[in-house]
Structures are given as C-alpha cells and as structure tokens.
Image: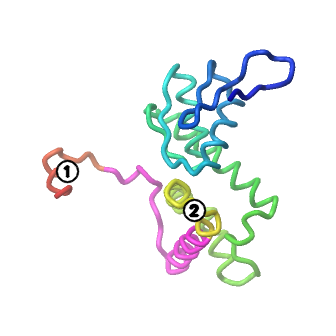
Amino acid sequence: MGFYADAKIKAPTFRDRGRQLVASRSDPNAIRDMTAIAKHRGWSIVVARGDANFRREAWLAGRSAGIEVRGYRPTERDIQELDRRIDRKLAVEARSGRSREAAPSGGGPASASAREAADDPGARSRLRVVESVVRARIVEPSVQERVLTAARDRVAGWLERGARFEPVGADRQPVDPAVRKERQR
C-alpha cells in the first residue's frame, strides 16, 4: 500500500509492506508519518537503512517518539537536536493541557519541586532518559503516564531534599574493557 503526499503526485511518498515501511527518498514529512505508523503499531525498535540523511532523520523522529532506532550512530549535535525536539514536544503538550496528569497541580510544595526539576538541567536530562525508556518499553499510554508521573514525583522529592543531578553523560568515565566484562557477569 502506498502513502501519497497529495492527490496530484503519482509516486507514493512511502510504501507499507506490513512489517516494513519503505521510502524512496529522504522526506522529513514522510519520516514523521512513518514514525507515527510505527508508534501506532506498537513497534518499540525499528531499523533505519539507506542514505545517512534519511537514517539521521529517522533516528531523530523515532527517538523523539520513544522508539529505539537502530542503524544510525548519532553525533553530539544529533543528541542536542533530539533534546530540543523533546523539549519542544513537552512544551506543546504542557500548553495544550495533555500533560496535566503528569504535572502536579496546586501551588503546594510538589508543584514548586516540579518547577525546580524543570529548571534543573541535570534533572531534566535524567527525566528525558526515563521518558525515552518508558515510551520505548511500555505500549499503553495510561501506564506510560502513570510511570512518568511517579518518576517526576520521585525526582521532585529528591530535589526537595537537596539532591542535585549531573546531566546524563557528564559523569561518564572511560571504562576499561576488562572491567566492563567483569560487570556483565
């Protein structure tokens, strides 16, 4: 089955082959639509093949939707772009009221802590990692929101007690391969 950008175009933007979605070119709108279909089908892992620009855009779209994308190794710039996309997505959700359940209401200490978590780059970075894992591993949206709400509440509680978080990746130390093997046992 083919998906078309509009009625005047004769060639499909991408094709659905059941277990595969295949695009003939690197169109960001097609990649966005393919990602929406993959998410709707509950795919938690996809493999991107083809041109480097296509794989990059597929990685960005998939990761921002909570889907693990294999076949592309992101650069530091790609990770920064992903962070920007996730921040924009969260801001839009907050403005539209979709994340009311996730954000504590009222003016009490919990909402102050939630605002503090949103202002703390380390906490925000950690929560993005948690969100990516939850969205990739849990299919049911209501369960996703429940787990994410619990994670936000837990981080807010830690911040209330004075905890500080380093951004993800900032505390990484090079690991000796021998030590890594020992850890895997």
Q: Looking at the image, which residue sits at the far top? A: 10
- The label on residue 44 is none
Where does the C terminus fall, quadrant-wise? bottom left
Q: Quadrant of residue 143?
A: bottom right
Q: Is residue 170 magenta?
A: yes
Residue drawn at point x = 70 percent, y = 50 percent:
89
Residue at mark 2: 120
**In whole angstroms, how far apart are the C-alphas of marks 1 and 2?**
31 Å
Q: Could you say which is closer to the camera, residue 178 or residue 98?
A: 98
Q: Can you say which quadrant of the picture contains the N terminus? A: top right
Percent position (x, y) of residue 5?
A: 78, 26
Label 1 SS: helix
Secondary structure type for disc 2? loop
Left or right: where 169 falls relative to 141:
left
- Judging by the rendered image, the residue that carries numbered circle 1 is 180
Residue at 60% across / 63% down in the picture? 140
Against 44, residue 50 (above or below) is above
Task: Residue 125 in the image: state x and y as whole percent.
Answer: 52, 56
Give 7 or 152, whichever is nearer the viewer: 7
Residue 180 x %, y %: 20, 50
Residue stretch rendered in magenta on the structure: 146-172
Q: Which is more toward the observer, 103 or 8?
A: 8
Q: Which amino acid, mark 1?
A: Arg
Identify which residue is drawn at 45% across, 59% down. 166
Indicate the position of residue 129 as horizontal and vertical percent values: 50, 56
